[in-house]
Image (tube, coloured by chain):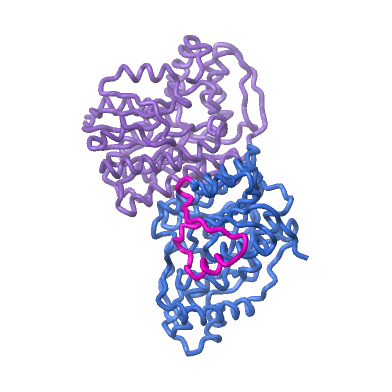
Chain colours: A purple, B blue
Amino acid sequence: MMASYRGLAVVAGGAGFIGSHLCRALVERGHEILCLDNLQTARPSNLRLLEQLPRFTFVEADVVNPLPEEVTRHSDQITRVYNLACAASPPQYQADPEHTMLTNVVGTHRLLRLAEQAGARFLLTSTSEVYGDPEVHPQRESYRGWVSCTGPRSCYDEGKRAAEALTFDYARLGRAEVRVARIFNTYGPQMHPDDGRVVSNLICQALTGRDVTVHGDGTQTRSFCYVSDMVEGLIRLMESDIDGLEPVNLGNPVELTVNELLERVIAMAPNEAKIVYRPLPQDDPRRRRPDIGRARALLAWEPTVPLEEGLRETFRWFAEEVGETAGETAI
Amino acid sequence: MMASYRGLAVVAGGAGFIGSHLCRALVERGHEILCLDNLQTARPSNLRLLEQLPRFTFVEADVVNPLPEEVTRHSDQITRVYNLACAASPPQYQADPEHTMLTNVVGTHRLLRLAEQAGARFLLTSTSEVYGDPEVHPQRESYRGWVSCTGPRSCYDEGKRAAEALTFDYARLGRAEVRVARIFNTYGPQMHPDDGRVVSNLICQALTGRDVTVHGDGTQTRSFCYVSDMVEGLIRLMESDIDGLEPVNLGNPVELTVNELLERVIAMAPNEAKIVYRPLPQDDPRRRRPDIGRARALLAWEPTVPLEEGLRETFRWFAEEVGETAGETAI
């Protein structure tokens, strides 16, 4: 039986990939939604689908700027603030590193203040990137990471670490009840095609008959969580009664190499694909796998969608989408 | 022979401990100074001394807020921007962690934009705290640190790491020429008495006949750089022609335990002192020592003031100051 939630949930970044799935799930569970998004990475087709939902309002806004009056005037009704605002793929977040840093720090600060003012609970979507290129496997929440604060990924990685620090300080000061999720690689329908993330890249390339590009030799590992599992984890974390002073990893602990992923994608492709190996970008992590012991214990959560099934769904969605919206670009 | 510098240097945090020594040294070398400070940790007596300098203007301002017109209207004359704005001792920066984070990220952002607008060179004073509780000794600039992004020190540590990330992004984008110094423990006259830093605490306690408190068992090590050496390092770094895409450690590589420091301080004290051991605060680093190979190679810089001499100067200053200004609190 699905729990039912009342009140107004603000979802910043709600028109993005995970955000749009989250908005839908929250509406289904009874929430009214105020979705903020600057449409930096959102797809027009995602937004059109969302706008058909009941109890859903979209406000175009960038959390780097003061929150619009359409949001602040509802502060007495807001019960939950989900902060998913930030481009998450390296080519997107590196295009404007200043904006990425400010989105994470200033944006999180504005949303924390909103949560404080509203007396709402706040959830930050942090990232496995706070572990950098980890020296321990799998990564537990207590691992402090191996992160460069000087390199081209640091606008995102350090921005998220700073956002965590600010969020936990709000909790320590009793200014807001907080939750922090560290999200590992997530995939599924409604990803942005060609956004530089490995699953969407490989599928789009395989579907359109282009060369399939692998960065590095493909022996680096990732663990991929299907988006419905991730959304379930985020909602459980938000609604749990845990002490919010510790972050919680959310991701799929099943680890595979990029080459193994590639094989599965190629097996689904309509035509034979040519594989091209490219240099690994600077500071790209070699290995990444969550220890989800804390999520299991505290939230009774773990991923349930097997990779084969999730990939099939994703492939099917991209097959329709890449055909239908050929030429559509991010708005 | 001392080099002579032209133009207007903005020194944010210029009324603080290191800032006030830096302002004096820059005036002596020919600069005109625009000193910004929110007077959060500055001592009134420091400021009174500074205001007697020629070519020195003080503007009370908090870099968290938009820079005042008294600063921006001079942007065509500004050639250097030194960012020293942030409380640096744990009790001070933890008193308002939100403000600490914003000082580092938003403040650095505002000063970077000023430097960009002015075509000025920008220097960020980062910190050895970006190494956290380090696992390698001594710390080289390439060491990525062992830093908690969830604990009570993270507002400062992660704030500085985020400030570095933003600064290096400005350099990578060609928006400003930058320098980043990672400052290790520094001491000397004009420190704030009882600000929670070990040298000033021990000296003030020993001078006033109070119990001398040691946190932990005193076997944790630190390395202490005399302030005139630090100021020389900062100016050399700013004026050097190095590629600004790497941070540079500045500090004294001579390592000693807190107990060894204590012995020297007690030997100077007028009366016998009682030592009290207190618990180590959360996340207090056990060991900290800079590798200054890069500063030696690039700046031909290393500390020249021996600890005995520096401590004597500092002790003498505190002896006058603690008597004269007993009861004076931070304004």
**Residue at image location 38% in from the left, 50% down from the top:** A168
Q: Which residues are magenta?
A: B37-66
Q: Is residue A221 above or below residue B192?
A: above
Tell me which corner region of the image, top left, top right, bottom left or bottom right, holds residue A10. Answer: top left
Q: Nearer the viewer, residue B223 or B99?
A: B99
Q: Nearer the viewer, residue A294 or A256?
A: A294
- Quadrant in which the N terminus of chain B appears: bottom right
**Residue at image location 54% in from the left, 30% down from the top:** A92
Q: Is residue B123 above or below residue A30?
A: below
Residue A91 position in % (x across, y down): 57, 30
Q: Is residue A289 left or right of residue A171?
A: right
**Residue at image location 43% in from the left, 48% down from the top:** A141
Q: Nearer the viewer, residue A60 or A81?
A: A60
Residue A148 visible from this viewpoint: no
Residue A174 position in % (x across, y down): 30, 52
Residue A124 position in % (x across, y down): 38, 40
Q: Report if residue A278 lies within the magenta region.
A: no
Q: Report if residue B51 lies within the magenta region.
A: yes
